[in-house]
Image: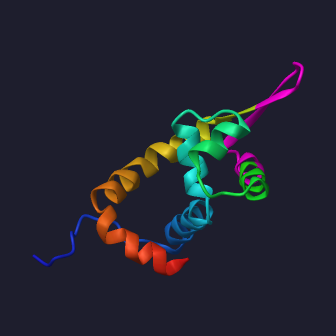
């Protein structure tokens, strides 16, 4: 028997394209951190800013709008004085976060090895 599992299906072009598209969405600078903050309870803009240190207000606003456009985050306007805006992971966002959780665990386990590579990429 070879090292390749005979029962595993080949990766076709459609699967490869879908996989790459998801990686590109969540791999954009700060997007993963904003999604993780949502998963860990951030709801208001100030929550995200506190939980994602280093992100600018402009970029945070941009990433939240992008995540809303992708259907990963829902935006709720609460009519109060002042008006409050809450962001929540959508069902689709929750599904993506569940799929990404093993990557978070992997990153935490291997953080010392991953940090130099991440620092070089910036």
Exactly how many numbered labels are in the figure? 0
Question: Residue at 16% across / 76% down in the picture?
Answer: 3
Question: Residue at 71% across / 54% down in the picture?
Answer: 63
Say left or right for 43 vs 20.
Answer: right
Question: Residue at 29% across / 62% down in the picture?
Answer: 110
Question: Can you say whether 4 is above or below 36 in the image?
Answer: below
Colour treatment of the image: rainbow
Question: Can you say whether 62 is above or below 71 in the image?
Answer: below
Question: Residue at 36% across / 69% down in the picture?
Answer: 114
Q: Is residue 73 magenta?
A: yes
Question: Can you say whether 102 is above or below 98 in the image?
Answer: below
Q: Which quarter of the rendered picture does the C terminus lie within?
A: bottom right
Q: Residue furthest left?
A: 1
Q: Residue furthest top?
A: 80
Q: Is residue 77 magenta?
A: yes
* Residues in magenta, as a range: 65-85
Please state the horizontal and vertical placement of residue 4, each as a whole percent of the image: 21, 75
**In which quadrant of the rendered view does residue 50 lie?**
top right
Please state the horizontal and vertical placement of residue 61, each as a whole percent of the image: 77, 51
Please state the horizontal and vertical placement of residue 17, each as a whole percent of the image: 56, 71
Q: Nearer the viewer, residue 89 or 15?
A: 89
Q: Nearer the viewer, residue 102 or 53?
A: 53
**In which quadrant of the rendered view does residue 56 lie?**
bottom right
Q: Nearer the viewer, residue 47 or 76?
A: 47
Q: Which quarter of the rendered picture does the N terminus lie within?
A: bottom left
**In which quadrant of the rendered view does residue 103 lie?**
bottom left
Q: Nearer the viewer, residue 61 or 27?
A: 61
């Amino acid at each position: 028997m070879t090292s390749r599992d005979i029962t595993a299906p080949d990766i076709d072009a459609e699967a490869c394209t879908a996989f790459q598209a998801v990686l590109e969405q969540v791999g954009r600078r700060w997007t993963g951190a904003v999604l993780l903050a949502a998963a860990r309870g951030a709801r208001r803009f100030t929550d995200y800013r506190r939980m994602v240190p280093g992100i600018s207000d402009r970029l945070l606003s941009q990433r939240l709008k992008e995540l809303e456009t992708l259907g990963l985050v829902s935006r709720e306007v609460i009519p109060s004085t002042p008006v409050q805006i809450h962001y929540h992971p959508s069902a689709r966002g929750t599904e993506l976060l569940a799929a990404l959780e093993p990557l978070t665990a992997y990153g935490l386990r291997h953080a010392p090895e991953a940090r130099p590579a991440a620092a070089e990429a910036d």
